[in-house]
Amino acid sequence: GTVTQSTVTTLADDGTPTVAASNLFKTGGVTAITDFNDGVVGQTITILAAHSIKITDGAPIILAGGADYDMTDSDTLTLTMFNDQVWNEVSRSVN
């Protein structure tokens, strides 16, 4: 499908929310995120924390330093899928 970068989509309160609808997201709950479903190779996503939430480092999400990211309100995280089903951290901002 078509992905528009101008649409900010709220993620489901789910450990593996879908990222099919957009590239820009804000968190929608407090459930720790362990993967993002429905991404495609070459897709870059940016997550804005609307509240405190944990992004879990592991096989599907490779974070800088190899540690979980405990996001707080207004923090951001940018990830790119370089290989099928593997997200790599590109950048983060602690705000």
Image: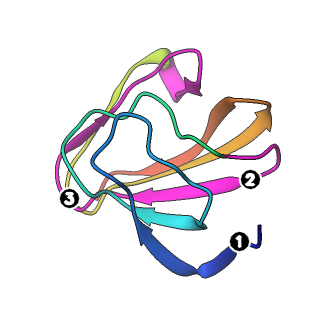
What residue is drawn where x is 47% and y is 48%? 92
How far is mark 3 from mark 2, CA to CA? 24 Å
Between disc 3 and disc 2, the foreground one is 2
Circle 2 sits in a helix, a strand or a loop, which is it? Answer: loop
The amino acid type of the residue labelled 2 equals Gln
Q: Residue furthest front?
A: 1
Circle 1 sits in a helix, a strand or a loop, which is it? Answer: loop
How far is mark 1 from mark 2, CA to CA? 9 Å
Circle 3 sits in a helix, a strand or a loop, which is it? Answer: loop
Q: Quadrant of residue 56?
A: top left
**10 Å crowding of disc 2: few (<14), some (14-19), many (20+):** some
Between disc 1 and disc 2, the foreground one is 1
Q: Look at the image and say whether residue 55 sits in the magenta stretch.
A: yes
Q: Position of residue 31 (x, y in %)?
A: 23, 37
The amino acid type of the residue labelled 3 equals Asp
Q: Give the residue at mark 1.
A: 3
Q: Give the residue at mark 3.
A: 73
Q: Earlier in the sequence, mark 3 or mark 2?
A: 2
The amino acid type of the residue labelled 1 equals Val
Q: Quadrant of residue 2?
A: bottom right
Which quarter shows the N terminus?
A: bottom right
* Residues drawn in magenta: 39-65
Q: From the viewer's side, name the closer residue of 24 and 9.
A: 9
* 88, above or below 11, in the image: above
The number of numbered badges drawn on the structure is 3
How far is mark 3 from mark 1, CA to CA? 25 Å
